[in-house]
Structure formats: structure tokens, C-alpha cells
Image (cartoon, rainbow, N blue to C red):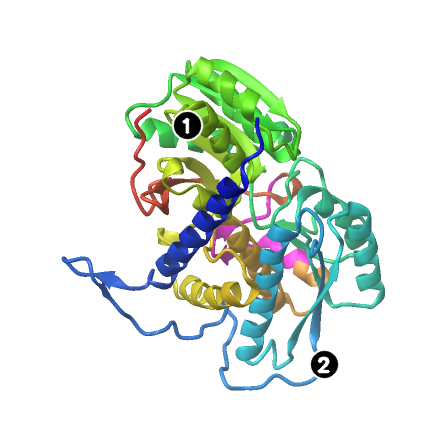
Amino acid sequence: MTPIPTTRRALLRHRAQLSAGAALLLVTSACGSSDSEGSTTAVPDAKIVAPVAGMTCNEGTKPTGDPIVVGGSLSLTGPLSETAKVHEGVAELVTKWVNDCGGIDGRPLKWDVLDDQSTPAQVASNYERLIGEHVDLVMGPYGGANTLAAAGPVTQAGYAFPTHTNGAPQELIGENHFPAWQFDGTGDKEHMFDAGATTLWDALKSSGNPPKSVFYATAKFPTTLSLAAAAKSRFEKEGVKTTGDVEYEFGTTDFSSIALRISQADPDLVYLGGLGADTTYLYDAFDSIGYTPRSVFAALPSPASLAGLDDEVNGLLTLSIFETDSALGDTDIARYFGKQYDEVAKDDDLFPLIETQAAASFAAWQILLTGVVNAGVDNKAIIAWLNSNSVDTIAGSLKFDGYNNYGGDINRVTQIQDGKRVLVWPKDVAGGTIDYKP
């Protein structure tokens, strides 16, 4: 594919900025109500509440004494930095939130983060250093490979290990592992992605017009390959025809040949097992050949990349564990988190919309803090308590009773509708109805 002209790249950036601004307005007005003429009625700012159930919030009380130090490694530089900075922003937010509530048992919470430069070897070294400095607790890093690299020193030292984005759930960590973004750990480890594939199929089926043909284009990345394989197996059991199946190198930016093959197959649904900006590159390739796909599912796109495509992705489906429009966002804790995240996003120049990454990050902190509230600052006791109890998080109630301490699958389906992210499946938490007409 011919490189995107400078003007085209500038246009995409401008679109992303405009759409991100629109998303910010959407989030900050999420607690308002609309009258019959479409105007929005303002509501008071969310009152501070404790970030987890069972924790007392003593607003105005300054914590004292030795801090409770949580150590972590994040990819603040390198290719994973854009997403890792979301997790850094959430960590800073939660630390301030706890201290605004008077700390934990009157002690301040402190976040100590090291940059791993997006390299697993540095991740392991960072946790060895943090543990050697006797941090009280740890928080997992960003990315599947980094999570597995951290697991060795963290597990060996006996620390509880909450994680927010472990992309390789089949790789065993142990009873100290407490994942926030959960796949199905209740059965065979080789089928942990099947439940998510069923959720996607059920969402499509609910439209009354599910696809009869699918073309798969998947990045060679552990999570995306596993998700796509599960989806393909599920769809073929339902009689859906596979019209093409391409695996491309992680980091690919030239999608011209893939777009051409898709256009020739002209499937009802394009299944893009991609990450980051892959969706942008694929749609640009479609533009270059004048092809409009009937419908697209994108597994793990960055929210900014979808915003940058504007109307082109109207109707696109994607995985999600949380959206502000859903029943999951209708709690005091979720509303307060949303208000605070808006401010962090502005200050740190982050994408302003709370979606899977920010939600999973906060959920991981809720897991850790809930363990501390119930078992004290004692890793052995925290591990034992979490293994025996469920935790209420922004993404729902989580249990740690399956393979690799994954519980039930919490992946849901979101659709882009008129420029907004709308959770459409399952019905019990959905904020809208799927609009699918291939």
C-alpha cells in the first residue's frame, strides 16, 4: 500500500482529536439527564466515596505514619508506552483517592513505579529491585509477556500479584495471581477463549441477521490468535462459511494486500484480530481501493484509533469489559472514578474515555485494596483471602477459583453507534441494542 500522504495522516490525527474531545464530553455528561428536547440537565459533581466496598472514607483526614508502598513496573517508554501510560494514570489516581479518604488505617498509600522500557527482561529486573527494597505490595505490569516476566520474582517472593492485562491466561502463574480482565478459567485451559467467542456470536445472533460468511485477518500475537481461533471454531459450528484466513506480522502497517483479498471475498463480516492502530491501517487500505466492508469486528483496537476513523467505523463491533453507558457505570464508585479520570486524562494527555484498559487497571487496584482492607498489609493473608472470596469491581464481581485463578469470562461486546461506544451485549449490563445489518 502506498504510504498515507502527509495530509491524510494530519487528517486522521485531527479526526482523533475532535472525536476524543467529543468522547470527553460524553463521559463528563454521563451522569446528566436529557429532557424531551435533547438538552442536558446538569447534576452535582460526584461525592467522594471509598474506591472499594468495606473501606471507610474519612474525607479531610490527612493520613500519617509510614506509607504503604505499592511497587510496579510499567512501559513508560518504548512501543507499549501509549497504553501503559493509561495504567500509570490510574495508579496515580487511585493513590490520591485513597489518601483523600484518609489512607488505609490512617496510613498513606504510596505508588513506586519503575520504567521497564517495554522489555520483559527489564520487567523482571524491576520487580527484583522493588522487592529488594521491601515494598509492601506490588501491582502487575502492562502486557502479557511483561506479566509473565514479572511472575517469577513476584511469586518467588510470596507477593500477591494483581494483574490488569495478562494477555496469556493459559500460562500458569499460581495461586497468588489475581487477574482483573478475566477469561474463562472454569474448564479446560485450552478453551479459555471459547466463552468470549460465544458472547460475540450471541450478540450477532441477537440482531436477527447473523453473518453467513467471515474473513479472518489476525495479528501474530498470542491473545489475538487465541481469540480468533476460538471465534472461528464457534462460527463454523454455527454453519458460518470462512471465506479467508490471514495471519500478519505484529506491527504491520501495510494492509493493502489484506484489504484486496477481503474485497474479493466480500464477506458478511470481517474479523480483525488486531491491536492498536491496526483498524486505522485496514480502513485506510479499504479507502485506497474504494471498498466498504459490510461489517467489521475488531478484537483489541486502541480507542483513539477508532475515534480517528470517525463515521467510517459506525457499526463496528469490539470486545470490552466496561463502558460508561452500561449498568456497570451506574454506581457511586464508577461515577467518582469517571470524574477523576477525566481530570487525569486532561493533565496527562490520555485518551479521555474509560474503556477496557482504564477499567481493568482500576479493577486490579480494587482487587488489591479489597485484599488489604480484609486481610491487612500481609501478602500471605491477602492471597488466602482473595482465593476464598469474590471482589466487587468496576467490571463486575470477580472470583479467583479457576485455572490460573481466572474465574468466569467477563468479555462483552461494544458497538460504535453514531460516534459513541455503546455496550450492546449481554443484555443484563448492556446500555443499548445491537444495530447489525450486514
Residue 111 located left or right of residue 192:
right
- Which quadrant holds the N terminus? top right
- Please tell me which residue lies in front, 5 or 360: 5
- Report the residue marked by disc 1: 201
User: Rounded to the nearest whole Å, what is the CA distance between mark 1 and mark 2?
Assistant: 51 Å
Q: Position of residue 123 (x, y in %)?
A: 78, 52
Of helix, strand and loop, which one carries label 1? Answer: helix
- Please tell me which residue lies in front, 338 or 306: 306
Is any part of residue 411 visible from this angle?
no
Residue 411 located left or right of residue 325:
right
The residue range painted magenta reads: 383-402
- Please tell me which residue lies in front, 234 or 25: 25
Is 321 one of the magenta-colored residues?
no
Res 79 label: none
Q: Is residue 385 above or below residue 305?
A: below
Is 389 one of the magenta-colored residues?
yes
- Report the residue marked by disc 2: 66
Q: Which residue is most to the left?
A: 36
Q: Residue at x 62, y 61 (%)?
A: 88
Q: Position of residue 151 (x, y in %)?
A: 75, 48
Mark 1 or mark 2, which has the lower sequence index? 2
Q: Residue at x 56, y 68 (%)?
A: 93
Q: Is residue 68 above or below residue 154?
A: below
Is any part of residue 274 visible from this angle?
yes
Q: Position of residue 236 (x, y in %)?
A: 47, 16
Q: Amino acid at mark 2?
A: Asp
Q: Residue at x 52, y 15 (%)?
A: 244
Q: Amino acid at mark 1?
A: Trp
Q: Position of residue 68 (x, y in %)?
A: 69, 73
Of helix, strand and loop, which one carries label 2? Answer: loop
